[in-house]
Amino acid sequence: MGTRTTKGWRIYPRIVMAAVSLWRYSGGRVLGGWGPLLCVFLGSLVALLVPLVGVENQYCAALRGIAQLRCQLWESSPQASAVQSTSLTVPFTGLDLLPHRAKPSKEMELEAKAALQQALEMRKLGKREKAQKLLVHALSMNPEFVDALTELGTILEEEKDVVQADHLYSKALAISPCNEKALVSKDRTLPLVEEIDQRYFGIIDSKVRRLMSIPKGNSALRRVMEETYYHHIYHTVAIEGNTLTLSEIRHIIETRYAVPGKSLQEQNEAIGVDAAMKYINTTLLSRSGMMTLGDILEIHRRVLGYVDPVEGGRLRTNQVFVGHHIPPHPRDLQRHMEELVQWLNSEEALQLHPVEFAALAHYKLVYVHPFVDGNGRTSRLLMNLVLLQARYPPITIRKEQRAEYYTALDTANEGDVRPFIRFIAKCTEMTLDTLLISTTDYTVGLPAAGQDQPCPDCKQTISIHN
């Protein structure tokens, strides 16, 4: 066995991994239970057919073939008209639900193409920074210019910014599902991005274990958890424009007396979130079994019940529009909600990392937007229910993070939900850090006394006057 033979077999696991991604991306729909076996067989066949000379180029060709096969399988899938909503990106079969933006003018499209051509020339000359600026300009002219997205992704990937490159490839595929270059690039970056995300989840897990090691009777932990409760109510209503202060919300919850000069609707919003949180803590967490549609409706009934008792706990009957996002039609809501509940109880969801599971639960509910009002508050409560069931602390998305929060949701609506998962992971880590810092004992010891003076390590800070 020579060096070239070793090199050929070293590439074999990567080809098998790419073949398995074919089955995973298809959501397991292709050939049912035979999918994994077929993918391993395809990977093995490709590996045997790859010559030992120029193996890297042939490997890329194999990836392109698998990517195109995946596209054809998607298009020929009997369920192509149904929206599959269990993957980490908005599936290509759900493109009709993606946000609709105004199409750029002909002049802007021409300018974007000219900028791309100049960027390619700059890249050939080794002027990568200029090429990157030209590509950014091209995308400002035409945000859905697939060639510019993939080219910018390639440059970022070369600069080791794999996460951002993967996002650009995902965006390109959401616009053009069968773009060959984007498919191959996505297959290349996806395993690397997943590894980065899993490392971050590992850091979060270690902090959760530290928190779990603190005795339940710890007075500092009890105190900070109580404060966190009021902070969550404050931020979850403030993020949607409520003007109540933290002290006012605490006064309303503890006394049930109204705050003079403040809107009754705003005060009822805070009372509703408090009622929903108590329902989760006393009812949903104390029972075992699967989550039901009734549970989500009961959470919403309490969230909105004090503001609009008629709409609380009821699916909307009118079409709504959320920025560029157009949620499903009212006649499809029951089906979408049943699919969501089925996913929440599925083995696929339960095997995800708790933070990933919670973030996707939040996004899927707010994506469907099943209620007239209170969708965001209900989605954040559902997210925390998932975390609490996994023995994670409930997290708070602070009002100062409002812009970042909505940007991540918009990005998910455009086809890549991973930035939203990372945002929720960051919020989880911030919550854990707050709890750990608040419960850490900082020992204040007295310096050891010397023989000649009572405190040799002490410095005189206040002058003594006789």
Image (spheres, grey):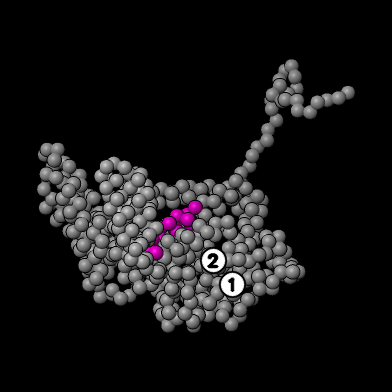
Vertically, is 275 above or below 11? below
Which numbered tag is attached to residue 288?
A: none
Q: Residue at x 55, y 74 (%)?
A: 373
Mark 2 near mark 1, Cβ–Cβ under 8 Å?
yes
Amino acid marked by disc 2? Leu
Residue 435 pos. (x, y %): 59, 50
- Using residue 316 as the reference point, say whether residue 304 is left or right of it: right
Q: Which residues are magenta?
A: 414-426
Q: Quadrant of the N terminus?
A: top left
Q: Position of residue 234 (x, y in %)?
A: 63, 62
- Where disc 2 sits, the SS reads helix
164 relative to 38 in the view: left or right: right
Identify the residue at the far front of this view: 107
> What residue is pinned by disc 1?
303
Type of amino acid under label 1 = Val
Give x and y (percent) for residue 279: 59, 70
Q: Is residue 433 something that shows in the picture?
A: yes
- The quarter of the displayed image where residue 338 is located: bottom left
Residue 381, disc: 2
As measured in the structure, the alpha-carbon distance from the residue carrying label 2 to the one carrying label 1 is: 10 Å
Quadrant of the rendered image containing residue 420: bottom left
Q: Can residue 189 be seen from the camera position used here?
A: no
Q: Main secondary structure of the magenta part?
A: helix
Q: Is residue 212 left or right of residue 11?
A: right
